């Protein structure tokens, strides 16, 4: 049975059809990481969840890429 790592810090964002969870956690090695999860109800009524994990050393590049993609989405 796998252990659930408790979050050091958490925030969530509720939208019309989904909830996004942003959790800072710490691995057994001591390294911190960001876990981004989304939760939604599928058309068949089942609750679904997807997760992305980004370790601290990858956060600068990840953040930069999200910013670039946001700029592209917002272009008219």
Image (tube, grey):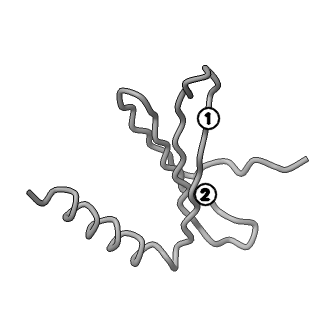
* Residue at left offset 56%, top offset 55%: 35
Tell me which label, 1 or 2, sits earlier in the chain: 2
Q: Could you tell me which quadrant the C terminus lies in?
A: bottom left
Instruction: Tell whether 26 sits left or right of 35.
Output: right
Q: Which residue is mark 1?
A: 48
* Residue at left offset 54%, top offset 56%: 24
* Residue at left offset 75%, top offset 47%: 4
Crowding near the residue tagged with mark 2, few <14, some 14–19, many ≥20 C-alpha atoms within 10 Å: many
> What's the mark number on residue 33?
none
Task: Specify the quadrant of the image occupied by residue 60.
Answer: bottom left
Q: Position of residue 22 (x, y in %)?
A: 48, 49
Residue 21 vs residue 71, the one in the foreground: 71
Residue 46 vertical placement versus 71 (above, below)? above
Q: Nearer the viewer, mark 1 or mark 2?
A: 1
Residue 57 vs residue 73, the one in the foreground: 73
Instruction: Tell whether 68 sits left or right of 33.
Output: left
**Residue that protrudes farthest toward the right in the picture:** 1
Q: Position of residue 54 (x, y in %)?
A: 54, 67
Crowding near the residue tagged with mark 1, few <14, some 14–19, many ≥20 C-alpha atoms within 10 Å: few
Q: Which residue is mark 2?
A: 25
Secondary element at image label 2:
strand
**Residue that protrudes farthest toward the left in the picture:** 76
* Residue at left offset 52%, top offset 42%: 38
């Amino acid at each position: 049975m796998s252990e659930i790592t408790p979050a050091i810090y958490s925030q969530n964002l509720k939208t019309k059809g989904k909830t996004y969870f942003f959790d800072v956690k710490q691995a057994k090695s001591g390294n911190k990481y960001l876990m981004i999860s989304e939760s939604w109800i599928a058309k068949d009524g089942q609750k679904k969840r997807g997760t992305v994990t980004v370790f601290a050393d990858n956060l600068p590049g990840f953040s930069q890429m999200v910013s670039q993609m946001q700029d592209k989405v917002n272009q008219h």
